[in-house]
Image (cartoon, rainbow, N blue to C red):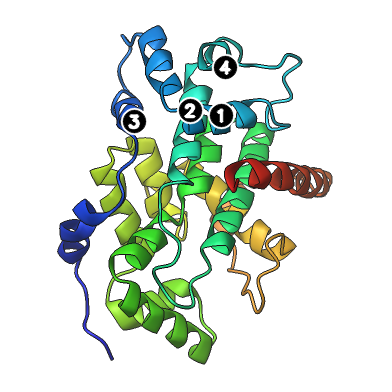
Amino acid sequence: MSEQLSYDDVVKNLEDLPSLPAVVMELLNSVDQEEIDIAVLARKVSHDQALTAKTLRLANSSLFGLQVKVTTIQQAITFLGFQSTRNLITAAAVTGCFADKMCPGFDHNMFWRHSIATAACAKVLARHVRFNQDYAFTAGLLHDIGRLVLVSTFPDLYATVIAYQQEHDCYPLEAERAVLGIDHVEAGLALAEHWNFSDTMRLAIAGHHEPGTPGAGFLAAIVHVADALVHALDLVRKPDDLVPPVSPIAWKALNLSEDTFLHLFRETELQYEEIALVLMA
């Protein structure tokens, strides 16, 4: 068995991770600020042309169904609101931020496809249960971000995790704990702290595998169910994919009818394809 890692080992290595564009860090840090000059931030974002292009493609996708085409960040804020636009900018930045050839056996493309599908599903779920759709989308996108932290900072060790998972036919979480002594939930929380994610986002990352834990929050239940549904729908077409068990507490909390689920599946599939095209470009 390889050496065991601690939470502190992960934290120490976070500095080596790719950093998000400065303007995205500013957006993340301003989550709880009321007084924020949106025009200034819009101008700063527009200096990063690749980020702007990706954000605007997302804003114009079926995710929002806008009747008008937005061509500037300022327009996106006008039509979608500051919160939505900030989350789209974050999504566009984070998906382009990690290198993808570090760890043998880890499929970077498939990782993001699963994350994008979970984000799409979580957003549709949130609409049905009248929860903030932007939070749900972002939490769905980032729920497994700790896996990228582990893959990027300890690639050789994570290759052992993948081998263990294949050999024992178990879930990634179990393989991580067995091999590393730490899992992607803890690594995700370390990154959330480092990148100043909001408390809402941290709770969702922390609770997405165990949404029945007291204090896990409703968003964790949404992401948990979205994650399981995406595995079950096999949108990503991952070979030998295990469908995680669904927490009865989370399932009951969402209280959705069979009709709603059929509608949910269709909508998730449609949006997933389009969002993947934008974010994987």
Whichever of labels 3 and 4 marks the residue nearer the N terminus, that label is 3
Which mark identifies residue 49?
2
Identify the amino acid type marked 1: Ala
256 relative to 201 in the view: left or right: right
Give the distance between the C-alpha atoms of the residues marked 3 and 4, in whole angstroms.
18 Å
**Disc 1 and disc 4: Cα gap in Å?**
12 Å
Tell me the CA gap for discs 2 and 1.
6 Å
Measured from the top left, where is residue 1 in percent x and y? 28, 91
Contact? badges 2 and 4 (CB < 8 Å): no
Residue where numbered disc 4 is placed: 76
Answer few, some or many: residues within 10 Å of disc 2's Cα (few below 14, many 20 plus, some between 14 and 19).
few
Disc 3 target residue: 28
Q: Which numbered tag is attached to residue 53?
A: 1
Asked if residue 6 is positioned above or below residue 267 in the image, the reply reads below
Q: Secondary structure at mark 3?
A: helix
**N-term mark: 3 or 1:** 3
Residue at (62% x, 16% y) in the render = 71
Amino acid, disc 3: Leu
- Residue 261 visible at all: yes
